Amino acid sequence: MHVKNLELKNYRNYSSLSLNLNKGLNIFVGENAQGKTNIVESIYYLSGVKSHRTSRDSELIKWDKDRAYIKADVVKAISDYTMEFLLSNEEKKAIKVNGIRINKISEVLGTVNVVIFSPEDLKLVKEGPAFRRKFIDNELNQIRPKYHHALLQYNRVLMQRNNLLKSIKFSPSNRITAEVFSEQLAEYGSFLCDARNEFIKKLSLIARLIHRKITNGKEELEIIYDCSIGKYKNKQETKKWLLKYYIEEMDTDIERGVTLKGPHRDDLIIKINGFDTKIYGSQGQQRTAALSLKLSEIEIIKSEVSEYPILILDDVMSELDLNRQKFLLESLKDVQTILTCTSLNDINAFHFDNKDVFIVKNGNISKLKDINNNEIYNS
Ligand SMILES: Nc1ncnc2c1ncn2[C@@H]1O[C@H](COP(=O)(O)OP(=O)(O)OP(=O)(O)O)[C@@H](O)[C@H]1O
Ligand SMILES: [Mg+2]
């Protein structure tokens, strides 16, 4: 799939923009704070109906305006889609697909698939568990609309249960309501664990192959689901286990004022040659493992929806050495790629035939005409 045309109005530092994008590689080059990430953010918005940087639409609206508009023509194997998002400071956002008003966000999720790779993602291994959970959730939200719904419900019930736990000391009768929430939490929670388990199994297989290639067969990567309730068996057992914990061990949770077990405490264990990469891996190994995981994301989406997602590489090239850049390049043959960099020298490995270079300057974009001209290329 690819975005053919992107239109922005009063989005971040863009007053008005209409861009034709290449179905291969699109390079956005510009100095800091010119609007490169703003562009890729608007493309990411198509997939998740939210920014990857903030959950508040109001931040996306140009400072002196009340509304922002994103429109994209997306080409997919089976059908084309025109997607429109009208963001407002005062009203609920309005979404249209092919001119038809959509009321539920879950109905739009999955129409466009985007994988985004930015420098923070290179810290995927090193960062705390919340970062890795977000990685899993973002992926599953795109390929399983039911997951998105279950996650929203789970987080809502979790918050309600946590609030009740804090109140039980003063109002013991709230325990009965907390039991009702516990049942709901176990139901949604076991659904999430089950989807995560299935996804991580796939991820592990694909990431191992990719990692072998990047390291010339020297390293075996292993991704293990670190489920907060222990070794994962199946949905039914998990539900039983969670419910038992939530009811029988409620006093532990009351004591701490939070729910201590459940998918909100899950993690991934990432091993290289049998050793935990987070603890023993070198910085280079941790980055390569992160790259393998991100590239696996692309392949998993391909296997789920039979089309490659759109790939965003935001400011990531200068963080990768030439070998890894080359590997990345080889993996991108059939993938529409939106790449940002501050200097074309950052992308030495990228000798693509099918590419356009755009210059980004203070919310304005111009296309570089002669990309084969070395002088311009290196300037
Ligand atoms: N809502 C908004 N309205 C107007 N301008 C905004 C808004 N939000 C952010 N900006 C501005 O957009 C500019 C560009 O931001 P962006 O993150 O796209 O930069 P960038 O080109 O990716 O820079 P870097 O190379 O540092 O990552 C910033 O100067 C920021 O102040
Ligand atoms: Mg940026």
Image (tube, rainbow, N blue to C red):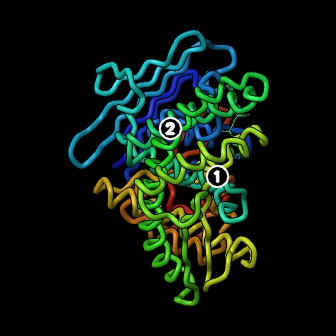
Q: Is residue 317 left or right of residue 238?
A: right
Give me the residue at 61% from left, 71% from top. 270
Q: Is residue 322 visible?
A: yes
Q: Judge the density around disc 1: few (<14), some (14-19), many (≥20) Cα neighbours within 10 Å.
A: some
Give me the residue at 38% from left, 40% from top. 146
Give me the residue at 40% from left, 63% from top. 299
Residue type at the position of mark 2: Glu
Helix, strand or loop at mark 1: helix
Q: Which residue is mark 1?
A: 265
In the rendered image, the vertical position of residue 212 relative to residue 158, given as above or below: below
> Residue 7 or 373: which is nearer the viewer?
7
Image location (x, y in percent) of residue 60: 62, 27
> Residue 279 or 237: which is nearer the viewer?
237
Image location (x, y in percent) of residue 282: 74, 78
> Residue 105 or 150: which is nearer the viewer?
150
Q: Quadrant of residue 34?
A: top right
Which of the labelled discs sits on residue 183, or is there none?
2
In the rendered image, the vertical position of residue 358 relative to residue 234, given as above or below: above
Q: Find out whether the residues at labels 1 and 2 contact each other: C-beta distance under 8 Å.
A: no
Q: Is residue 337 visible?
A: no
Q: Judge the density around disc 2: few (<14), some (14-19), many (≥20) Cα neighbours within 10 Å.
A: some
In the rendered image, the vertical position of residue 242 relative to residue 333, given as above or below: above
**Picture quarter with the C terminus:** bottom right
Residue type at the position of mark 1: Arg
